[in-house]
Structures are given as structure tokens and as C-alpha cells.
């Protein structure tokens, strides 16, 4: 019986993880949410350990749902870190997804 309980718990945990991942994939964080604020802090003022990961591991962080203003600020103030940044589902100032991509 304990093995069946462990299996059931594993299935429930896996299903809930997939649900959360799917929601995050299709709905980028809205401005003024904790996830957005965390990403903005990491983009504009990374802590020592985040910066070390970028430098030593050549890590690239994917920022999702940032505003065009955030991206412009990063490009101006942190150009030396650009190779460690990737932006997806960027939003304009009105919160709408910015589809004004240059070819």
C-alpha cells in the first residue's frame, strides 16, 4: 500500500507541475507582479551570485514579458551584459505584446 501511495503522489505532483509550466508558457508575467519584479531586479540590478553565473558559466537568462522600456534601459545601462540576455514576449508601455519586430 505505501508504494501505491507514493506512486499516486508522484503522479499528482507531475500533473500539477505540467499545469503550472503550461500556464507560464502561454501567459507571460504581467507588470507589477512578483515574477515581473523579480525579473526586472535581475535585469537591472543582478546580485553578486547572479552576475557570477553569467560570467563563469556563460549563462543566458530568458526574460519573459518585460516592457520595451525595461529592454531599452538594459541596453543603455548594461550593454556589457547583453550576451547573457534574451527577451521574449516583450510588452509595450500599454501592457500589450509588442509585435513590432525588425527583420
Image (cartoon, grey):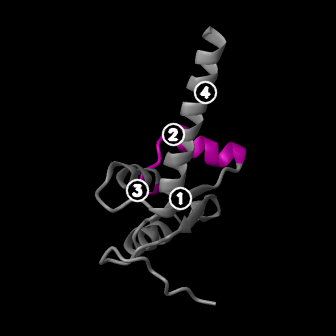
In the rendered view, would you say 47 is above or below 74? Answer: above
In the picture, the quarter occupied by the N terminus is top right
Q: Quadrant of residue 84?
A: bottom right
| Residue drawn at 57 percent across, 58 percent down | 62
In the rendered view, would you say 45 is above or below 64? Answer: above
Crowding near the residue tagged with mark 3, few <14, some 14–19, many ≥20 C-alpha atoms within 10 Å: some
Crowding near the residue tagged with mark 4, few <14, some 14–19, many ≥20 C-alpha atoms within 10 Å: few
Distance of label 1 from label 2 (alpha carbons): 14 Å
Q: Give percent across and percent down for residue 35.
A: 39, 50
Residue under pointer 4: 10
| Main SS, magenta residues | helix
Which disc, if any, is residue 43? Answer: none
| Residue drawn at 59 percent across, 36 percent down | 14
* Membership of 49 in magenta stretch: yes
Who comes first in sequence, dot 4 or dot 3?
4
Range shown magenta:
43-57
In the picture, the quarter occupied by the C terminus is bottom right
| Residue drawn at 58 percent across, 60 percent down | 81
Q: Give percent across and percent down for residue 6.
A: 61, 18
Who comes first in sequence, dot 3 or dot 1?
1
Residue under pointer 1: 25
Q: Nearer the viewer, mark 1 or mark 2?
A: 2
Q: Observer-nearest residue: 92 or 15?
A: 15
Q: Mark 3–mark 1 contact, CB under 8 Å?
A: no
Residue under pointer 2: 16
Residue under pointer 3: 40
Q: Mark 3–mark 2 contact, CB under 8 Å?
A: no
Farthest residue, direction front? 1
Amino acid at each position: 500500500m505505501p508504494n501505491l501511495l507514493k506512486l499516486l503522489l508522484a503522479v499528482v505532483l507531475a500533473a500539477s507541475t505540467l499545469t503550472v509550466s503550461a500556464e507560464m508558457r502561454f501567459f507571460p508575467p504581467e507588470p507589477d507582479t512578483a515574477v515581473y519584479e523579480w525579473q526586472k531586479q535581475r535585469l537591472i540590478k543582478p546580485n553578486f551570485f547572479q552576475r557570477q553565473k553569467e560570467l563563469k558559466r556563460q549563462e543566458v537568462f530568458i526574460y519573459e514579458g518585460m516592457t520595451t522600456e525595461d529592454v531599452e534601459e538594459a541596453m543603455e545601462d548594461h550593454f556589457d551584459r547583453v550576451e547573457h540576455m534574451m527577451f521574449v514576449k516583450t510588452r509595450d508601455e500599454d501592457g500589450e505584446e509588442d509585435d513590432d519586430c525588425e527583420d
